[in-house]
Image (cartoon, grey):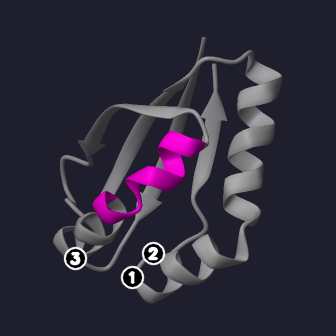
Amino acid sequence: MARIFMTHRVSDYDAWKAVYDEDAPRRQEGGLSEGGRYHSSGDCNSFLIVWDMDADVGEATAATEGLLADPELAQMMQDNGVLDKPEFWVA
């Protein structure tokens, strides 16, 4: 089991979350299950998402890189207020 930690900074968390929730099937098809979402204490638009994946670290890293390389997802993130390219770590 791998755990994926991804940071995001968005312009409007509530608007972003509505689109994120609608996109749940993509994450489920990719084998991700959400472990939690944690906001920065000083900025609710800056947060960390935790996902779990039934894979080893290498497989989870490759799957996450694949998701982030998807042009459709990249456009969706741009259209919905993601301000910076998300960073992620896998453990």
Q: Looking at the rendered structure, which numbered label has been put on residue 80?
A: 1
Q: Is residue 42 above or below residue 61?
A: below
Q: Which mark is residue 15?
A: 3
Helix, strand or loop for disc 2: loop
Vertical placement of 38 versus 77: above or below?
above
Q: Which mark identifies residue 82?
A: 2
Q: Position of residue 84 (x, y in %)?
A: 54, 72
Look at the magenta stretch and give its main secondary structure.
Answer: helix
Quick check: marks 3 and 1 in contact, CB under 8 Å?
Answer: yes
From this view, report whether residue 45 is shown above or below residue 31: below
Contact flag, marks 1 and 2 (Cβ < 8 Å): yes
**Label 3 to label 1: alpha-carbon separation:** 7 Å
* Amino acid at dot 2: Val
Residue at 75% in and 50% down: 65
Among all residues in the image, which is located at the extreme top?
A: 1
Q: Reading the chain from its start, which is encountered first: label 3 or label 2?
A: 3
For mark 1, give the secondary structure: loop
Disc 3 to disc 2, C-alpha distance: 11 Å
* Distance CA(mark 1)–CA(mark 2): 6 Å
